[in-house]
Each structure stands twice: as C-alpha cells, then as structure tokens.
C-alpha cells in the first residue's frame, strides 16, 4: 500500500498529471449536472449525436488546415444542439430520429472527408483516438487547462443561477410556459451548455464514449434518490469520483483514459442499482 501511495505522489510531481486531473474532474462535474436534465427530458442520446457532429466538424477543420479547430467545432456543435433541443419535438422528424440522423450522418461525413483529404500516415490511429479518446488528456498545455477552467466555471454558474428555471423546463415545458417562463430561452441555454461540454469532453473520453459520461452518473443517482436536487448532487459527486478513479487507474496501469473512466461509471451504476434495490427500489 505504501508503494502505491509513493507511486501516486511521484506522478503528482508532474504538471501533466495535475492538468489531466483538473480537466477531467471539471468535465465530469459539468457533464453530470446537465446529464440529469437530459435524461429526464428523454434526450439522453443527444451527447452521442453532438459528439459525432463535433467529429465531423473536426474533420472539416482538418481539411481546411485551421490552426484552432475550436473556432469551427464549437459553433457547429452549438447550432446542432439548438436545432435538436428547440425544434426536435416540433418538427416532422422527432427528437430521437433527428439525433440518430445527425449522429450517423456527421460520423460518416467526417470519416469520408478524413479518407479523401487525409495528410496523416496513420489515419486509422487518428480516427480511433478521436472516437475512443487518446492520450491528449495527458499532454494538455496550461492554456488549454485555463480555457477548460473558465468554460467549466461558466457552465456551473449558469446552472446554479438558473437552477429553478431549468428544473421547470425539465419536468413540464407546457406548465412552465403557462406560468410565464421563457421556455425557448432556457432550452437554448441547455443546448449551448451541452455543446460546450461535448467539445471539452472529446479529448477526455472520445466521441463514442461521451454519452456515458453524461448519462451514467445521472442514472446511478436515480437508483438511490428521488428528488431532482438530491439526484443532481449525487450525480455530481459520483461523476467526480469516477473520473478521478478512472484517471488514476489509467495513469498507474497504462489503460486507455476514456474507456477506464466509463468502466468505473458502469461499475458505479451497478453498485447504485444494488443499493436502490436494498432500499426498496426507489427511483425517479
């Protein structure tokens, strides 16, 4: 045990390990907060759809040789999030079908572009890293860390400030609209927040695993608690714990970062499900 603590202390001496933990924990916190809302609004799959949009946007940015792909990836992801959350239930193609169409279309389009215009000698490796996460979380610069800190603080502050309005919109949009709540504005706010989280999280877990980061903590918390507030707090704590544990295991054992974090999230879900059954199966 002492050898393990000595090894952990040794790794903490390196800035890249501290950077990875800071970014990983912040992304996990933001994902869990908005994840509860998305699960309850039956938009759990939106994280996967938007991550594929981000993948397609990254492919376009690569073809255009943009030095900073965030300038293209973030706006496109935000626009798609707005279209899905604001018009998904009003359009002829409903929310779940629209997400599936965008998800598959963006993924195929992005991969096609990367094949046609690729300048990389290891296309398969690049695609695999983008889809399943890579070691880029361990090569973060101080500038990237500060960007993540600032965006994460904005997301958390917006969620806290508009908590009650988000609660209303989450459970009953029609009732919220009848009481004067600007439902469209808060749906727009939720769309922007989830888009920012998706773009930030791609370096951590990859586009195919982002949904797990958003969904599993919320579902795990719902196995134990019933109220929206309790579920949100429990989801945040679970997500942070799983992200920390996953990152430490990944660093110590040399396993893929994204897959390790998701595996810990899955394990936490089964543990919470067992606790829920022992309590009487109370879920929301």
Image (cartoon, helix red, strand yellow):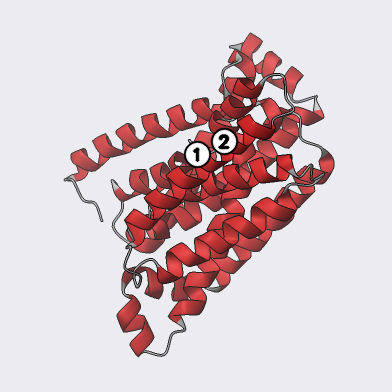
Mark 2 lies on residue: 112
Task: Answer with left or right where residue 249 lies relative to residue 8.
Answer: left
Quadrant, the C terminus = bottom left
Task: Answer with left or right where residue 206 lies relative to residue 233.
Answer: right
- Label 2: few (<14), some or many (≥20) within 10 Å? some
Residue 230 visible in this rendered orientation of the protein? yes
Q: Residue furthest top?
A: 3
Is 162 drawn above or below residue 110 in the view shown? below
Image spot of residue 248 (x, y percent)? 60, 25
Residue 48 visible in this rendered orientation of the protein? no
Task: Answer with left or right where residue 265 lies relative to residue 249.
Answer: left
Q: Nearer the viewer, residue 173 or 168?
A: 173
Is 124 drawn above or below residue 197 in the view shown? above
Image spot of residue 112 (x, y percent)? 57, 36
**Please, what secondary structure does the residue beneath circle 2 have?**
helix
Q: Nearer the viewer, residue 218 or 200?
A: 200
Mark 1 lies on residue: 108
**Residue at position x 45%, y 51% in the image:** 102
Quadrant, the N terminus = top right
**Residue 249, located in which quarter of the rendered image?**
top right
Is 233 drawn above or below residue 64 in the view shown? below
Q: Nearer the viewer, residue 280 or 104?
A: 104
Image spot of residue 81 (x, y percent)? 51, 60
Label annotation for residue 138: none
């Amino acid at each position: 045990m002492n050898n393990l603590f000595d090894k952990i202390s040794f790794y903490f001496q390196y800035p890249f390990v501290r950077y990875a933990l800071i970014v990983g924990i912040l992304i996990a916190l933001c994902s869990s907060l908005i994840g509860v809302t998305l699960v309850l609004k039956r938009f759990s799959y939106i994280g996967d759809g938007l991550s594929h949009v981000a993948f397609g946007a990254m492919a376009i940015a690569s073809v255009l040789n943009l030095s900073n792909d965030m300038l293209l990836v973030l706006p496109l992801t935000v626009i798609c999030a707005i279209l899905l959350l604001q018009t998904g239930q009003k359009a002829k193609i409903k929310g779940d079908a629209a997400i599936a169409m965008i998800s598959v279309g963006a993924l195929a389009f992005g991969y096609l572009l990367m094949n046609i215009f690729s300048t990389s000698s290891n296309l398969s490796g690049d695609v695999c890293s983008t889809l399943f996460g890579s070691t880029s979380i361990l090569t973060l610069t101080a500038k990237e860390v500060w960007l993540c800190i600032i965006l994460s603080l904005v997301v958390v502050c917006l969620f806290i400030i508009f908590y009650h309005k988000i609660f209303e919109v989450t459970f009953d949009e029609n009732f919220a609209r009848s009481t004067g709540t600007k439902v469209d504005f808060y749906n727009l706010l939720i769309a922007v927040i989830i888009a920012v989280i998706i773009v930030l999280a791609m370096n951590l877990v990859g586009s195919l695993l982002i949904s797990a980061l958003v969904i599993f903590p919320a579902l795990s918390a719902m196995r134990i608690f019933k109220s929206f507030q309790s579920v949100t707090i429990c989801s945040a704590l679970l997500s942070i714990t799983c992200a920390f544990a996953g990152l430490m295991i990944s660093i110590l054992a040399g396993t893929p970062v994204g897959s390790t974090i998701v595996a810990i999230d899955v394990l936490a879900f089964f543990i919470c499900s067992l606790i829920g059954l022992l309590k009487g199966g109370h879920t929301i």
